[in-house]
């Protein structure tokens, strides 16, 4: 290498020295600004704590109802989100209610940004409400008290919107997700569609490291100890600490390095997020113990083992509203297996889903993290906006499992083909229990280990309560609890550096000078590139530490709780084929319910008149499509409006939904029998009524946004032949020609057949095997109130 090309050449050396000087000045300035941002963080934390109701809700609001005024007071409240001047809402649309998660952080995350769940609903023109909370719980309040409060809030929202086309849409994030599903299982009549985002429901499922902490710590005795040291309150900062420990690379390095490296542009975002992240709240000891014992460790929600105080079973199969589950593979707190595992825990197959008249739509994201599911602007502008825009269509989906996918508008597709010119296209296709099972991957061996954890936890908790708890409670006072809370490491990190520090004024003044003479270094600076390389190495090292730590936890958990000694202590047998928990579908109540359902649908097959015949015929043709997307949603809403205009006696939204879901469910029960019963439904109808109910190719093509295909035309020909036959019975006597013939011979019509009492609620596969496209619209309907009441009350026990 020549001297001229060497770094020791005068020109190259001088250039390198200049780069070093520029980087040194930039690094020093960034260090000062970084310290000042943390000073502002401390001031923001202190000011936030002084607020009467600290929150990060970024929308104007007014109080509607306070939970403190309820018979069983709670620290929750209902507020109405005030419409923005440039974004009015349509009071004729159904209201949205966003419920905030109480999992250690303060309230407001659902309305943290303009592109949030509230923002998405308001952009779609819906009135919005928010259920939040204050940091301190009401003494003695329980999880069931919060459920009762949520039910009272929803009754109030429904009362404020008597002309709503449907019941309120309820959105729950994380902890709020399982909380509202529990509420909906007890009071299903209060809920419209339910959207749960990042909500853990099946706690033994998945492979995330948080599953193992309860077992490795010996169960929930530590939760009881922490609550006792807090004088009856559990400090939510410990929950936040658990989240921080999950990803040490982000906690110890990446989050702070991102602020340091982009201090000129990142400060506002960082401070905004830290206001939420540092807003620690409290839970009562009885609340936290219930959550850990019965949900996290006991996993009783996913198998319908929870009971209310007056003996009503909390069974998610009681929910009658569509449930939209949104989860992400990048979520290390609630991975898809935990968000979807309740489906495989409660249902054996698709027939079981149909038998319970339940509609479940799930969507997965490839990479977004836990908080990003309800905080990220990209998710808010994409998934949440599409859910809000198409919620009325989701509400009409027949019973079954569906998978939703939101993608960018395909190239070449005009924007006007999508609702309101959106840039994203949501498609929904028929799925099933088997596809969910491939995501969840149930593991009986893993369940046995967690069952052992549950038993060990019960033993250790009993030991603590009998021998240690009296002493801990006697030594704990509100004063000692206060100081333990103030000395929590997370709180100390906020409190230790603020304007109250003696050196803060020096740093603040220096930061002002730095901003005036800021000299950021060029991105091509070699020292800046070396800085990024070092950061990447540190992050990779911490990630490797996390992987090894998590693997060690998993291995230790498997060895410890896979031991035959612990299995024996947990009361388990050595037989692998003996389940550690009974399947909810094996109960006598469940079998009785399915038999009752079967009798009901046999009766509905041959009732409903001309209106039912018309809807059934249209659904039969449309269900030949396997997948629908946003274009069909828009045209479908236009079609629905046209039907309402022509048939004012079914203008009520709930009646429309029940009518559509009933006929779709009958098609799923036995498609041939349902279609062949059409002439029977038309008996006694006038010629004008029959004419009104006849579907046309043009009408159906408009819903599908393209001409009918071969399968649709064949199905249309079949139903037109049946309408032709019915009309002919009236016209033959008058010597009039039949009116609805398509020119082709009408298909042979089989005699209407009633299913035998021993047949399943699901379609009889030996008689008819629907093709892939026919699965696209099979479904169910809301059952009569008598059926709802008998199931929700659980063997004649009254609901709370």
Image (cartoon, helix red, strand yellow):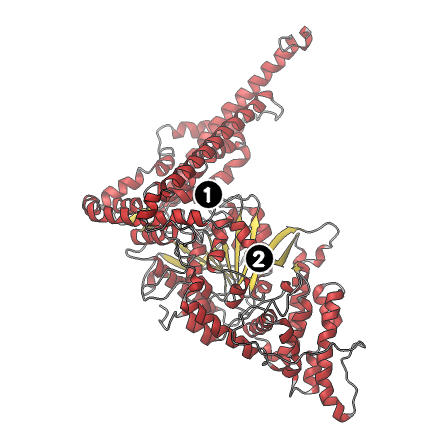
Mark 2 residue element: helix
Question: Which residue is the site of mark 2?
Answer: 387
Seen in the picture, residue 22 relative to 463 is either above or below; the reply is above
Is residue 173 left or right of 690 when viewed as pictured? left
Point out residue 307 in the picture as x, y percentages from the top left corner: 35, 62
- In the image, which is nearer the foreground, mark 1 or mark 2? 1
Per the rendering, the mark at residue 706 is none
The answer to which image quadrant residue 425 occupies is bottom right
Per the rendering, the mark at residue 208 is 1
Q: Residue at x 68, y 60 (%)?
A: 631
Mark 1 residue element: loop
In front: 250, or 780? 780
Point out residue 605 in the picture as x, y percentages from the top left corner: 58, 77
The answer to which image quadrant residue 706 occupies is bottom right
Q: Residues within 10 Å of mark 2 (few under 14, many from 20)?
A: many
> Is the C terminus in the top left, top right, bottom left or bottom right quadrant?
bottom left
Q: Residue at x 65, y 62 (%)?
A: 633
Residue reaching furthest to the top = 3
> Is the N terminus in the top left, top right, bottom left or bottom right quadrant?
top right
Mark 1 near mark 2, Cβ–Cβ under 8 Å? no
Residue reaching furthest to the right = 743
Q: Does any portion of residue 313 appear in the rendered image?
A: yes
In front: 1, or 783? 783
Point out residue 12 in the picture as x, y percentages from the top left corner: 64, 12
Q: Residues within 10 Å of mark 1 (few under 14, many from 20)?
A: some
């Amino acid at each position: 290498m020549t001297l001229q090309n060497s770094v020791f050449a005068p020109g190259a050396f001088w250039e390198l020295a200049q780069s070093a000087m520029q980087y040194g000045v930039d690094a020093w300035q960034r260090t000062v600004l970084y310290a000042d941002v943390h000073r502002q963080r401390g001031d923001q934390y202190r000011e936030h704590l002084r607020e009467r109701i600290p929150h990060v809700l970024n929308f104007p609001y007014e109080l509607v109802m306070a939970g403190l005024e309820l018979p069983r007071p709670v620290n929750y409240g209902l507020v109405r989100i005030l419409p923005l001047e440039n974004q009015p809402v349509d009071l004729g649309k159904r209201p949205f209610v966003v419920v905030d998660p109480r999992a250690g952080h303060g309230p407001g995350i659902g309305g943290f940004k303009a592109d949030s769940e509230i923002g998405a609903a308001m952009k779609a023109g819906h009135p919005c409400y928010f259920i939040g909370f204050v940091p301190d719980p009401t003494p003695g309040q329980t999880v069931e008290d919060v459920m009762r409060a949520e039910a009272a809030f929803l009754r109030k929202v429904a009362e404020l919107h008597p002309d709503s086309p449907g019941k309120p849409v309820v959105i729950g994030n994380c902890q709020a997700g399982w909380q509202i599903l529990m509420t909906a299982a007890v009071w299903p009549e209060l809920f419209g569609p339910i959207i749960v985002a990042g909500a853990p429901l099946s706690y033994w499922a998945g492979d995330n490291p948080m599953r193992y902490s309860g077992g490795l710590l010996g169960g929930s005795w530590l939760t009881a100890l922490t609550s006792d040291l807090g004088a009856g309150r559990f400090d939510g900062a410990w929950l936040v600490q658990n989240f921080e420990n999950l990803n040490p690379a982000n906690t110890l390095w990446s989050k702070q390095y991102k602020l340091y490296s982009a201090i000129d542009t990142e400060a506002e975002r960082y401070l905004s997020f830290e206001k939420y992240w540092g807003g620690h709240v409290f839970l009562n000891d009885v609340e936290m113990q219930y959550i850990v014992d019965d949900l996290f460790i006991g996993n009783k929600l996913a198998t319908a083992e929870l009971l209310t105080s007056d003996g009503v079973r909390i069974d998610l199969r009681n929910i009658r509203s569509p449930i939209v589950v949104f989860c992400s593979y990048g979520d290390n707190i609630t991975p898809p297996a935990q968000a979807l595992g309740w489906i495989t825990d409660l249902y054996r197959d698709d027939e079981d889903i149909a038998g319970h008249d339940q509609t479940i739509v799930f969507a997965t994201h490839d990479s977004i993290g836990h908080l990003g599911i309800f905080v990220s602007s990209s998710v808010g502008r994409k998934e949440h906006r599409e859910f809000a825009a198409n919620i009325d269509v989701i509400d009409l989906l027949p019973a079954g499992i569906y998978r939703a996918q939101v993608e960018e508008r395909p190239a070449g597709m005009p924007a006007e083909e999508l609702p309101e010119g959106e840039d994203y296209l949501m498609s929904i296709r028929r799925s099933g229990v088997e596809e969910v099972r491939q995501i969840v991957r149930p593991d009986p061996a893993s369940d046995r280990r967690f069952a052992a954890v549950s038993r060990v936890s019960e033993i250790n908790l009993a030991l603590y309560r009998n021998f240690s708890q009296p002493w801990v409670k006697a030594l704990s006072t509100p004063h000692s609890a206060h100081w333990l809370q103030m000395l929590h490491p997370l709180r100390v990190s906020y409190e230790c550096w603020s304007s109250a520090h003696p050196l803060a004024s020096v740093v603040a003044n220096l930061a002002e000078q730095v901003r005036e003479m800021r000299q950021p270094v060029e991105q091509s600076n070699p020292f800046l590139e070396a800085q990024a390389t070092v950061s990447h190495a540190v992050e990779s090292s911490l990630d490797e530490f996390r992987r090894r730590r998590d693997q060690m936890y998993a291995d230790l958990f498997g060895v410890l709780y896979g031991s035959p000694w612990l299995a024996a202590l947990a009361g388990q047998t050595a037989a692998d084929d003996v389940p550690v928990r009974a399947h909810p579908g094996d109960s006598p109540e469940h079998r009785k319910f399915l038999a009752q359902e079967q009798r009901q649908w046999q009766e509905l097959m041959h009732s409903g008149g001309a209106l039912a015949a018309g809807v059934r015929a249209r659904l039969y043709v449309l269900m030949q499509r396997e997948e629908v997307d946003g274009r069909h949603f828009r045209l479908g809403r236009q079609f629905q409006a046209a039907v309402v205009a022509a048939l004012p006696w079914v203008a009520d939204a709930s009646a429309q939904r029940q009518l559509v879901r009933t006929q779709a469910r009958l098609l799923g029960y036995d498609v041939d029998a349902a279609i062949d019963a059409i002439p029977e439904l038309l008996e006694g109808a006038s010629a004008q009524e029959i004419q009104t109910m006849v579907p046309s190719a043009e009408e159906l093509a408009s819903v599908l946004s393209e001409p009918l295909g071969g399968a649709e035309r064949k199905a249309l020909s079949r139903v037109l032949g049946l309408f032709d036959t019915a009309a002919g019975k009236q016209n033959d006597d008058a010597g009039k020609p039949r009116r609805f013939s398509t020119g082709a011979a009408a298909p042979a019509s089989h005699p209407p057949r009633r299913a035998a009492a021993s047949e399943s609620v699901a379609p009889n596969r030996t008689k008819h095997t629907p093709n892939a496209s026919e699965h696209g619209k099979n479904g169910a309907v809301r059952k009569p109130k008598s059926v709802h009441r008998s199931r929700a009350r659980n063997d004649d026990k009254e609901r709370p």
